[in-house]
Amino acid sequence: MASSAPIGVFDSGLGGISVARQMRVDLPYERIIYFGDSANAPYGIKTPDEVKKLSFSIVDNFVKLGVKAVVIACNTATSAAVNDLRAHYDIPIIGMEPALKLACDLGKGEPQHVIVAATELTLRERKFADLLQRFSQNNTIFSQPCPDLVRIVEQGELNNSEKVMDTLHKYFDAYDLDNIDSVVLGCTHFVFYRDYFRKLLPERTNIVDGNEGTIHHLREVLAERGELADAFSEGSITLTNSDKSERIYQLAQSLCTKTD
Ligand code: DGL
């Protein structure tokens, strides 16, 4: 049986909008309630316990709103909270992790040189250590925290190309980029920088993110439970945020319609 209940999608702030806007394309019949926790962003420099607490209060709220599933559109909150959230709630909780597998698979068996750009917390947590262990035997993997890339999005400075390029150079100039096969955008905020990364990186370097894979997984889970919205439903997205300022409202709207 189809379900017309909404799907809750959350992030520490505006980054998860990169996932939600793709959901509008890939799952056009679904109703999406997006919650950005910009008042508490960034999560990437908090402790796992702090992020867990914030995540629980967001999911509690989603459950009160009657969501049929939750997407943690945040690699950081997934690292800190996904296991506990799954143990506590009986609706599907879809998490995200840096798409390292996708990057390594692009090598079709050839050892790859990959940079994973993510938050400090994601790169420090157990979940990422497990990923590294799986893929670092055959590949060379570099972990690069990029906290300023989160701040720039939250401050509405994504169009300041000079500032963005300076920041990218600060984080990536130390690498021999000609020898990097893929850069993984392991934080949903970073997906908004795809065009800037394209300018920074040699043409042969792949830029990989986990957004489509996450949505594909969500679709499979909902289909298996018979809970996809039916094709007569009108999909929608409602953007909400813990920061109630007009600035954040406008920024969220513009990121949601941003094409890149
Ligand atoms: N967008 C988040 C992620 O995917 C985290 C950004 C932050 O708040 O530090 O990891």
Image (cartoon, grey):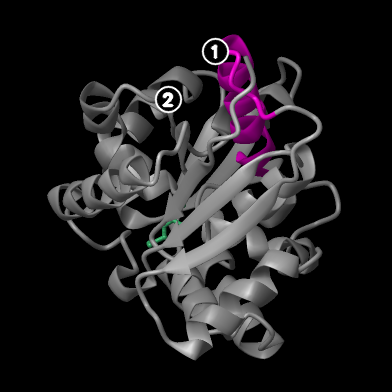
Q: Which mark is residue 92?
A: 2
Amino acid found under the numbered disc labelled 2:
Pro
Residue 47 position in % (x across, y down): 17, 54
Q: Magenta span has 223?
A: yes
- Contact check, label 1 and label 2, Cβ < 8 Å: yes
| Residue found at x 78% / y 45% | 25
Give whichever of 160, 254 is nearer the camera. Answer: 254
Instruction: Tell me which residue sits at (70%, 85%) in the image.
Output: 161
Q: Nearer the viewer, residue 190 or 94?
A: 94
Q: Main secondary structure of the magenta part?
A: helix
Beta carbon of the mark 2 residue lies under 8 A of ligand 1: no
Q: Circle 1 sits on which residue?
A: 225
Ligand 1 picture quarter: bottom left
Badge 1 marks a residue whose secondary structure is: loop
The residue stretch that appears in magenta: 208-229
Q: Position of residue 13 (x, y in %)?
A: 43, 66
Tell me the quadrant of the picture where the C terminus can be found: bottom right
**As drawn, is 243 to the left or to the right of 124?**
right
